[in-house]
Image: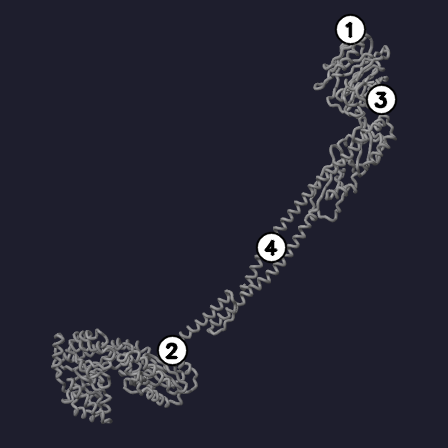
């Protein structure tokens, strides 16, 4: 039931109950009063009736006594002067209006009579009426009183009577206010002789009666039935009740109207508010305040309205937090993904290009110039990226120093042009507080070519391209199809890698290192290959970056290291010692137990530490240089040879290099490969070699593919060469075959049980 | 008994005594039913073999304290009765009895005209002012009569002879039948049973 109806009905029911109770009470009281009043009137009337009869009796008695006491009348009685007596009787009867006057002897024989049908000589039952009694004669009722005639003893009776006829009864009825019925007992039962009540007008149930015995002794049995109609007694009360009913009906109607009006007054604003709430639930918070009142409902509406504003503003800020980057105001990854998804879903056939932009050196900016400057730089970079003119584009900040953008391209070729524009936009230094700050960026680009590609996939493609650009030290890279299976399979890759380690799907490849001066074999770099069950042999580029991202690299390094140490130990026991170089990553350096792992492995396989070289890139020092140095010191103290990989591409300063406990540097292949085409690079390479030597380090060059390069390196005094020119990476079997007949750089094998310092010294000695 | 009553009584007895020098004592005892008294039962002896001469007696019925005294009297025919009024209020004595109808005008004090009761029968006296005043005077043609005393006893001296005995009392419930009584020289005792009603509804009929 609706609230309005419920309120109204409740009011009405309540009032109806009260009215019903009141009316019931009044009606019951009225009924009781009517009955009481009727009974009281009957009591009074009965009393009056009896008094009237008594009064009549006295009147009759007095009249009869007056006659009986008259001396002349007694003389006439003594003389039996009948004529005189009759005239005297008639005279006295007329005096009081008696219908009957009879003189009898003492034994009831009529001497003289007047009125009625009493004849002289008949018997008249005078003795019955001495105290006054009823007599029925010829269907008529008489009230008769007998008085003795004394002279001085009783000698005769004189009886006088009134007839109780209709007139007398009506007179009695008028005086008593009651209905009077006189009834006589006959052989056939009671018979009403006189009746003042019109029998057909009154219901018997509505009449109360009183029965009065009028006869005494042996006289005729006559009763008077006095009656009072309750209807008459009730009449004034019934009028009152009718008025009350009218008032009740009117008040019910008025209350009904009032209740409905009131309920409607309450519920209509409630309905309005409910509608507002429904709209709010549907997400619409800008509904105008619909209820303008001063009462509680107004307050409620006001409260709802302000709640609506509060929810709206909170909603907006939640949306901002959820979809917007707080610092730059750009979209976050979620919003960007959604926007990109929307654009892709349009399937307009246009080319959608996505760029993932990674800032170089940003960590350094934060460290050296403070986070406020870093934030300022980020903000300006965001503005610049956003300012690049594109078609239907969006820009987002994905992570601390990573941004993303997408745009609608004319064709696939536009992608590189767009990427170049972005690079150029970021090439200029950023000015913070008038200080120029150089921020370089690397771009990964991808274009949606497949119609069904999702936003996530497209972004992952761009990120893969970014990885490639970073690893290839290029400013930008475009995602190529070949990368895609890896990208698609990336989620399952981790599980597969774990399985690969367990199932020995990983395989060690070895690329020999050649001592340039003597052309002897100096050792070999250990490289990982993955014999994937479905995808074939995978190179390190296809899973090492992923392993580094996911932290699985530690497990891989441990595995590789252990296998390499085992292999090295095997050769060493066979008297064919060969120094093996294993790549470790920045993540491994960050592992505080890494040195103990290395020591445990050497100890387990009984490999002299000098036969193990660990190669790490300069990036291993970026995150926490101090911790990295501590770890390197610990490893070096084991007697293990340390080598800086990719030398020349990193950011390590010379002073830092000087502090590092390394034994060799490995010049990055990019310099070696361009040696022939770019004459300037020769200078760089030469400088690097000389610098390494200056620091007392052995210098290794990798990526040597031409005789030209080999010659130049020999000319520059590079110590060790590695590359396709000399030998490609090969399996163990191939290596062992290859090594046959090759002269090796001699290595003094020292047992690992020696103290660490001793080992280190020994190795150093052995190296030079 | 007041002095007037005593005097009347002595007068009657004295008269009987004088006229019956050779009389025989006759004792009549009337017995009433238990609870009632036979006092004042009137006993009348009518001689059957002689006709007594009319008397010229006098009698007095006084009115004392709104009562006739004596209430019951028996007199010979021809007796002159005077009605003195001893009360300080007036009385009006009357009789509608057939034996003697008379009316004495309202009077007080000394008696007015005496009334001669000249016919036998019962005369009921009343006062027209005071309905409750009633007196009975039995008028008889014989000098031989008496009223029983409180014990129901009466003694008469009757000359020998045959008599008719009549018995009357105002409250007799049933009449006592007249009987013939023969008086010899020997004293006679007569036992009578009378049915006296303590609360009579009417006066008993006078035995003729």
Rounded to the nearest angstrom, the CA distance separating label 3 from label 1 is 44 Å
* Residue designated by label 4: A19
Q: Which label sits on residue B102?
A: 3
Rounded to the nearest angstrom, the CA distance separating label 2 from label 1 is 176 Å
Q: Chain of mark 3?
A: B
Q: Which label sits on residue A324?
A: 2
For the residue labelled by badge 1, is the local secondary structure a helix, a strand or a loop? loop
Rounded to the nearest angstrom, the CA distance separating label 4 from label 1 is 112 Å
Decide if residue A177 is on the left or right side of residue A506: right
**Residue B53 seen in the figure:** yes
Q: Nearer the viewer, residue A358 or A667?
A: A358
* Quarter that holds the N terminus of chain A: bottom right
Q: Position of residue B21 (x, y in %)?
A: 81, 6
* Quarter that holds the C terminus of chain A: bottom left
Q: Chain of mark 4?
A: A
Q: Are marks 4 and 2 in contact (CB under 8 Å)?
A: no
Q: Nearer the viewer, residue A348 or A217?
A: A217
Q: Earlier in the sequence, mark 4 or mark 2?
A: 4
* Residue designated by label 1: B186
């Amino acid at each position: 039931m609706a609230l309005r109806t419920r309120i109204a009905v409740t009011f009405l029911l309540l009032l109806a109950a009260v009215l019903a109770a009141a009316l019931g009470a009044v009606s019951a009281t009225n009924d009781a009063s009517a009955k009481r009043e009727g009974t009281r009137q009957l009591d009074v009337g009965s009393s009056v009736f009896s008094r009237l009869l008594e009064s009549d009796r006295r009147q009759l008695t007095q009249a009869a006594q007056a006659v009986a006491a008259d001396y002349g009348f007694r003389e006439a009685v003594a003389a039996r002067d009948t004529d005189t007596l009759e005239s005297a009787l008639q005279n006295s009867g007329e005096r009081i209006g008696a219908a009957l006057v009879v003189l009898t002897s003492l034994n009831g024989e009529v001497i003289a009579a007047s009125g009625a049908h009493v004849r002289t000589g008949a018997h008249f039952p005078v003795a019955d009426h001495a105290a006054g009694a009823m007599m029925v004669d010829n269907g008529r009722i008489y009230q008769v009183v007998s008085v003795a005639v004394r002279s001085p003893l009783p000698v005769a009776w004189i009886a006088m009577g009134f007839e109780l006829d209709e007139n007398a009864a009506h007179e009695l009825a008028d005086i008593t206010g009651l209905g009077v019925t006189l009834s006589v007992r006959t052989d056939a039962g009671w018979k009403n002789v006189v009746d003042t009540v019109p029998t057909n007008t009154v219901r018997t149930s509505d009449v109360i009666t009183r029965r009065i015995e009028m006869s005494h002794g042996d006289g005729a049995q006559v009763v008077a039935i006095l009656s009072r109609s309750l209807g008459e007694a009730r009449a004034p009360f019934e009028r009152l009740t009718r008025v009350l009913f009218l008032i009740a009906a009117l008040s019910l109607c008025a209350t009904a109207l009032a209740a409905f009006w009131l309920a409607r007054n309450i519920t209509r604003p409630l309905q309005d508010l409910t509608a507002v709430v429904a709209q709010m639930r549907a997400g619409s918070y800008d509904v105008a305040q619909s209820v303008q009142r001063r009462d509680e409902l107004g307050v409620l509406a006001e409260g709802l309205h302000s709640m609506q504003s509060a929810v709206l503003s909170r909603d907006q800020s939640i949306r901002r937090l959820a979809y917007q980057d707080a610092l730059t105001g750009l979209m976050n990854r979620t919003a960007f993904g959604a926007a990109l998804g929307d654009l892709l879903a349009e399937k307009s056939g246009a080319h959608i290009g996505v760029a993932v932009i990674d800032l170089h050196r940003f960590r350094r900016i934060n460290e050296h110039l403070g986070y406020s400057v870093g934030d300022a730089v980020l903000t300006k970079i965001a503005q610049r990226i956003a300012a690049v003119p594109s078609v239907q584009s969006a820009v987002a900040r994905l992570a601390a120093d990573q941004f993303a953008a997408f745009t609608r391209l004319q064709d696939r070729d536009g992608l590189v042009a767009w990427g170049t524009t972005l690079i150029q936009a970021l090439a200029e230094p950023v000015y913070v507080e008038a200080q120029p700050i150089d921020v370089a960026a690397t771009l990964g680009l991808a274009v949606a070519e497949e119609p069904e590609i999702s936003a996530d996939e497209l972004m992952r493609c761009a990120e893969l391209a970014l990885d490639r650009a970073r690893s290839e030290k290029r400013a930008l890279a475009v995602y190529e199809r070949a990368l895609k299976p890896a990208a698609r399979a990336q989620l399952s890759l981790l599980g597969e890698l774990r399985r690969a380690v367990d199932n020995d799907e990983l395989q060690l490849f070895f690329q020999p290192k050649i001592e340039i001066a003597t052309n002897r074999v100096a050792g070999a770099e250990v490289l990982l290959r993955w014999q994937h069950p479905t995808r074939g042999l995978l190179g390190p580029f296809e899973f090492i970056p992923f392993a580094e991202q996911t932290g699985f690299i530690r497990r891989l390094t441990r595995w590789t290291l252990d296998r390499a140490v085992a292999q090295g130990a095997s050769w060493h026991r066979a008297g064919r010692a060969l120094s093996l170089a294993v790549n470790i990553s920045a993540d491994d350096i960050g592992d505080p137990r890494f040195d103990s792992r290395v020591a445990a492995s050497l100890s387990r396989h009984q490999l002299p530490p000098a036969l193990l070289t660990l190669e790490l890139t300069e990036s291993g020092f970026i995150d926490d240089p101090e911790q990295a140095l501590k770890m390197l010191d610990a490893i070096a103290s084991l007697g293990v040879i340390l080598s800086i990989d990719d030398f020349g591409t990193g950011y390590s300063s010379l002073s830092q290099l000087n502090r590092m406990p390394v034994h060799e540097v490995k010049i990055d292949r990019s310099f070696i490969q361009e040696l022939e085409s770019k004459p300037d690079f020769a200078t760089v390479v030469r400088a690097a070699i000389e610098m390494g030597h200056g620091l007392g380090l052995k210098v290794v060059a990798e990526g040597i593919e031409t005789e030209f390069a080999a010659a130049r390196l020999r000319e520059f005094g590079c110590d060790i060469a590695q590359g396709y020119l000399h030998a490609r990476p090969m399996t163990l079997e191939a290596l062992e075959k290859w090594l046959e007949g090759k002269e090796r750089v001699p290595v003094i094998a020292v047992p690992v049980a020696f103290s660490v310092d001793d080992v280190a010294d020994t190795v150093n000695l052995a190296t030079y | 008994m007041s002095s007037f009553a005593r005097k009347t009584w002595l007068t009657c007895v004295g008269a009987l005594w004088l006229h019956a020098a050779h009389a025989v004592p006759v004792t009549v005892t009337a017995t009433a039913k238990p609870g009632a008294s036979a006092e004042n039962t009137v006993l009348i002896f009518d001689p059957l073999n002689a006709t007594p001469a009319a008397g010229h007696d006098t009698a007095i019925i006084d009115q004392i304290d709104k009562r006739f005294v004596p209430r019951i009297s028996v007199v010979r025919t021809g007796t002159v009765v005077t009605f003195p009024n001893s009360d300080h209020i007036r009385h009006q004595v009357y009789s509608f009895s057939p034996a003697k109808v008379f009316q004495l005008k309202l009077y007080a004090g000394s008696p007015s005209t005496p009334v001669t009761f000249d016919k036998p029968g019962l005369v009921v006296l009343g006062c027209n002012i005071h309905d409750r005043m009633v007196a009975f005077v039995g008028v008889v043609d014989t000098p031989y009569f008496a009223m029983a005393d409180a014990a129901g006893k009466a003694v008469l001296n009757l000359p020998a002879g045959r008599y008719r005995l009549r018995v009357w009392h105002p409250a007799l419930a049933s009449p006592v039948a007249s009987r013939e009584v023969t008086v010899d020289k020997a004293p006679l005792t007569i036992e009578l049973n009378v049915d006296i009603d303590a609360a009579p509804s009417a006066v008993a009929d006078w035995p003729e």
